[in-house]
Image (cartoon, helix red, strand yellow):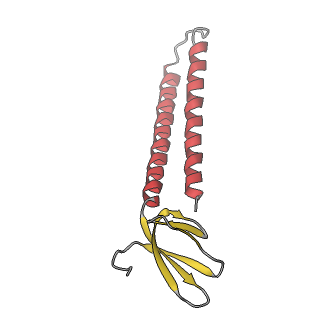
Amino acid sequence: MRLPIVISKILLTMAVIGVAWLVIRHRQQSLNEPARIARPVAKEKSSNRSIKWLSYALLVLMISASLIYLGWQVEQGYRLVTVRVVDAQTGRSVSYIARRMDVDDRHFVTQDGREIIVADGERIELSAYNPQQLP
């Protein structure tokens, strides 16, 4: 269940590495600039500029996508869900309300703060929260 958070952390790390690489590359180019011999290379300059702008645009796109995805994950985590705990042997079920981020594999915390640990013989069913569903 925590896989999307891991993916967003990986994307953010890649973005930071990309920015650091661009900064280091820019500094190295500016240090080597006076040592270069002046020669007219207008075509290379224009292609380098387009590659530079393309890389910046790609970096901005990656960071924006990561932030949008992270915001979506946070919004989904705060969403209320109905948690039904069903006893597999008797078929008896009990419903609770919890935030999506508070539900784990065999454990969840209800909206009113109760901590529920599900037994091995029970299963958890999640559904969208509907106030008319619960008694």
Seen from the viewer's position, the closer of residues 115 and 26 is 115
Seen from the viewer's position, the closer of residues 94 and 80 is 94
Residue at the spot 64% in from the left edge and 82% down from the top edge: 121
Give the side of residue 74 with respect to residue 91, left or right: left
Seen from the viewer's position, the closer of residues 48 and 17 is 17
Give the side of residue 90 with respect to residue 83, left or right: right
Seen from the viewer's position, the closer of residues 103 and 1 is 103
Q: Position of residue 79 (x, y in %)?
A: 42, 63
- Quarter occupied by the N terminus: bottom right
Residue at the spot 44% in from the left edge and 51% down from the top edge: 71
Q: Position of residue 67 (x, y in %)?
A: 46, 46
Q: Quadrant of residue 89?
A: bottom right
Residue farthest to the left, as pictured:
132
Q: How many numbered circles are shown?
A: 0
Q: Position of residue 57 (x, y in %)?
A: 46, 37
Residue at the spot 58% in from the left edge and 8% down from the top edge: 34
Residue farthest to the bottom, as pictured:
90
- Quarter occupied by the C terminus: bottom left
Q: Position of residue 18 (x, y in %)?
A: 57, 35
Residue farthest to the right, as pictured:
120
Q: Quadrant of residue 33?
A: top right
Residue at the spot 52% in from the left edge and 14% down from the top edge: 40
Position above or below: 64 against 108: above
